[in-house]
Image (cartoon, coloured by chain):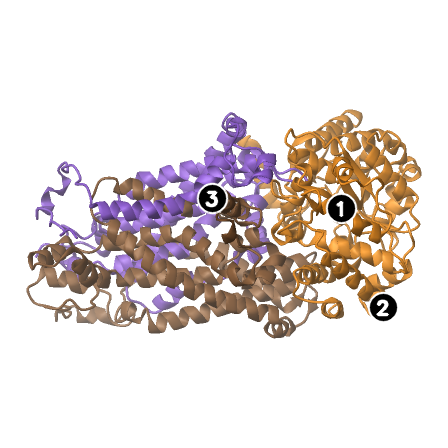
Chain colours: A brown, B purple, C orange
Amino acid sequence: MTVREMSVSDATGLAAHAGGGDTPPPARPRSRRRRGLGWSGRLEVLLLAGPAVIFFVGFVILPVLMAAYYGFFRWSGFGPATDFVGLKNYITIFSDPNFQSALLHNAFIVVMSLVLQGPIAILLALLLNRKMRGQSVIRILIFVPYVIAEVVVGTGFSLLLSTNGAANGMLDKLGLGGLTQDWLADPSIAIWTLMAILTWKYVGFAVILFLAGLQGIPEELYEAAAIDGASYWQIQRQIALPLLAPTLRIWAFLSIIGALQLFDLVYIIWGQYVSSVAGTNTMAIYMVVTGRNAGNFGYGNAVAVVIFVISLIVALFYQRFVLRRDTAGAITERGVQ
Amino acid sequence: MTLVTAPPAEPRLRRAPKPKLPWGSPVVYFVALAVIALMLGPVIYIIIGGFRSNSAITVDPAGFPDPWNIDNYVGVITSGQFWGQVGNSTFVALATTIGAVALGIAASYVIARYSFKGRGFLYALFASGLMFPITVAITPLYIVIRSLGLMNTLPGIILPQIAFALPTTIIILVPFLRAIPDEIQEAASIDGCSRLGFFWRMVLPLAVPGVITVGILAFIGSWNAYLLPLFILNNESQFTLPLGVQAFSSQYSVDTARVLAFTSLSMLPALLFFSLFERRIVGGLTGAVKG
Amino acid sequence: MAGLAAVAAATLALSACSGDNGGGSGDGTVEMTLWQNSTTGPGQQFWKDAIAAFEKENTGVTIKMQSVQNEDMDGKLQTALNAGDPPDIFLQRGGGKMTAMVNAGQLMDLTDRISDDVRGEISEGSFAAETYQDKVWAMPLSVLPGGFFYSQDAFDKAGISDTPTTIDDLKSDVESLKGTGIAPIALGAKDAWPAAHWYYFFAIRECSPKVIEETGDSKDFSDDCWTRAAEDLTDFAAIKPFNEGFLTTAAQQGAGSSAGLVANRKAAMELMGAWDPGVIASLTPDEKPLPDLAWFPFPEISGGDGEPGSMMGGVDGYSCSAQAPKECADFLNFIAGSEQQTKYYEAFQSPPVNSVAQKSVKEPYLQQILEAYNSAPFVSQWLDTVLGQNVGNALNVAVVDMLAGGSDPQKFIAAVNAAGAQG
């Protein structure tokens, strides 16, 4: 039996039953329930999801809507917004070459984050998934970069990577002075420096997520394959990896959205001005530089809305084409009554 | 390459004391070591930086502390403010984590396992929370918190942070909860278990790896948050750790070495939390499915 | 404490929309809040002492102080102001921000509340910085002109006997300094404004005071002098006088900043405002002021329209919020008086505005700064303050671009004009 890509429950259905595939919903006299939740079901939905929704709408959605409203104004940041300019801010944003280059940078960061962090994190997760001595310590140490606040990471890396910083100093001391670079200000290198820092910081997050995802794979599958004579890496590639796919897709989603919002690290390490010179400008940096720091708060809010819309479009595409297999049936047909 | 040795197929004994863990292959340790060296390099730089003076860092960025100046670390550890801030941060982070996990798992369960109109919209609502740069929405949020009378209080930080943590929590938990096979749920309802009872007695234990993961993420997120506490808290006795760094910046300059020492110490409690819980990212569906 | 917080919370909840806080409560006690940006050291201590002294003289008045880190102050203040929940007394940056606050009705008009003593002791020029639409909106406390802070030892080693009076002198001094193995001039271009200050100074040498004021209103940089200033800057930068890696050097943020370079004798001088000695002092190996620190004003150029001796600088001041009780103005008068101003100078190491307090200034470089400032024929505020935040910000960006080699004087002026056209 080939282990193609299946959902986890397919796989466990496999393990649990001698037959294969998804067991069809039994034809029982429950069919009348499938047309919608009964009142008790609705009550449960309200009870369980209600608090979260209230919190979320009150503290996130409401402020966001209020902030988006200011995007239609020219606002100095003080007092009520009185200068309604309609879509003018948005037109300016899209015609500004600085914004366009920032958008390109974000796109690059999105793609490279996936390409760099994904494989490394998968490899590490697979390596660390086996029980062995020291596994806890290794996991903790890999996670450390994620724990450190972005502000501190920024300060530390500024000291390390500035032209007179520790990295170049170390190269000098080791006699490798010829390799010193302008890690931060050189436009041909800076974006790669940024990618290295991002990988460093966020690979731990991916590893943790993948480790959790790997726990959902029943041991029986590994055992069965081992009995069949598969090597460790064959098992990883053909069982663990495909079953990890849903977790992978969720991680990729979070990574993409996070990459579109990137701000703190770039702002602290490069500063708001040099980031555009060095080619590491992001949309969020553009938002702060042209908005808050220029006293054009309405414009900044408009940029925020643009970032939101772009993220939303990306998310919708992602949902439709990538997550579909995970949500297929879940949102439309499945879901036990 | 070593073959994996299938552990003895006795999941029912999992609760019994485990035999000592075997050593992994040397290749694994080597790779792990290389990765850790890369990960920790900058961290060690930050920690060592705390042992130097600002002048030394300027003059010789790549040098070792000479002499090892413990004043910065000692100054931080002996300051009552530091421990007060640790206490505040811990309280806020724990409350945020508990709140976010509780609300998040309840909402995720609904989205994952109930079928109703508007379920997709609910999921999209939470997911969209990640997509708006929150720095821009801070003024309206301030007004909301103020109208609730929560200015200058720790709950004024905790409640919004719970809301901020919900999107990631729900996005991660929904697939975990959905992965629980329907057969288990049907078996439970045959046994007379209501949906809520199923949730309580079976889903929660099975979702432990996911729950631990989102708990850790919520804790770290709260631990490092500085924007909201900065705007909401005016009383120094309530400051959280990220605000404590302010004390080392004078009007025009920053005591870099002190800041490095302070932040090196601040990351320890968060690491402690992580180490306590990461062992629990095990379990899951094993043993739950038996024919 | 918890009880007090509960009462405070309840009161806030009840008055959520009125935003009235700190007003007199009819039984004679007045409570005010003060936000200032010294979170540590003698600066913070000054405020504590000043508050204690004021409270002693004015029984029934209490002031609660909040120290907010400098970088975070603007955001926190703006949020509080817009939520109707501002502190009573707070740091005022002046310029476009102050204008915006005035237009939103968020500041207290101080024009008629300044005491006669204070009026007499503080120069008109200092008040001018805090004036908008002919009304005074903040009490000036410290004047911070820009100039070169340099290490006398470094100059001696390079064989420089006199401080440069013209740009050509400065250029040759730079060459001499290069020979001694340290960076001639430290520049923290990562924060942009230190680089922009170079442009501003060339501008006040090239442009007549009239043109500067006109451009401040019109935001139109078509006068030739602005372009000449940009060319001066690129010419000067071409001799590579700045420290290596100036694009990634911060101005004052701790170790590795341009101030740190001067403090540790890795650079000979930097062009900076009068707060620099305090910053340098905190970054030296022994954390004491640099013993051989000295000052000279920005050199003159040949052929410019600017008046020789013109200076540029900022003014630190404090404002009262529109809702603050009248005791707020009393407090401002108190700290602007000669006694408190002397203490201010001692704490912050920066020139006080009060002429009586100025007599107690001891440091030679501060005395030189005050002398040059008081005898200057024309004093401008920092040009990004004069031009407003929008144009000022664009100017900062354009200067960094130009210094990084990404643009030339023509493109520079075009970029600034474009921002100016937006108003």
Give the Cα separation between the discs numbered 3 and 2: 53 Å
At a point 48% along the width and 63% down the height, the residue shown is A260
Under mark 1, the amino acid is Ser
On the same chain: label 3 and label 2? no
| Residue C100 appears in the figure | no
Q: Position of residue A77 (x, y in %)?
A: 68, 57
The chain that hosts pointer 2 is C
The chain that hosts pointer 1 is C
Is label 1 in contact with label 3 (beta carbons under 8 Å)?
no
What residue sits right under mark 2 in the picture?
C223
Residue nearest the viewer, comparing A111 with C327: A111
Q: Position of residue A133 (x, y in %)?
A: 22, 40
Give the Cα separation between the discs numbered 1 and 3: 31 Å
Between label 3 and label 2, give the one nearer the viewer.
3
What residue sits right under mark 3 in the picture?
A174
Callout 2: 10 Å neighbours few (<14), some, many (20+)? few
Q: Residue C366 occupies which quadrant of the picture?
A: top right
Which label number is shown at residue A111?
A: none
Residue nearest the viewer, comparing A129 with A309: A129
Q: Residue A93 occupies which quadrant of the picture?
A: bottom right
Under mark 3, the amino acid is Leu
Quick check: C274 above or below A13?
above
Q: Position of residue B37 (x, y in %)?
A: 37, 44
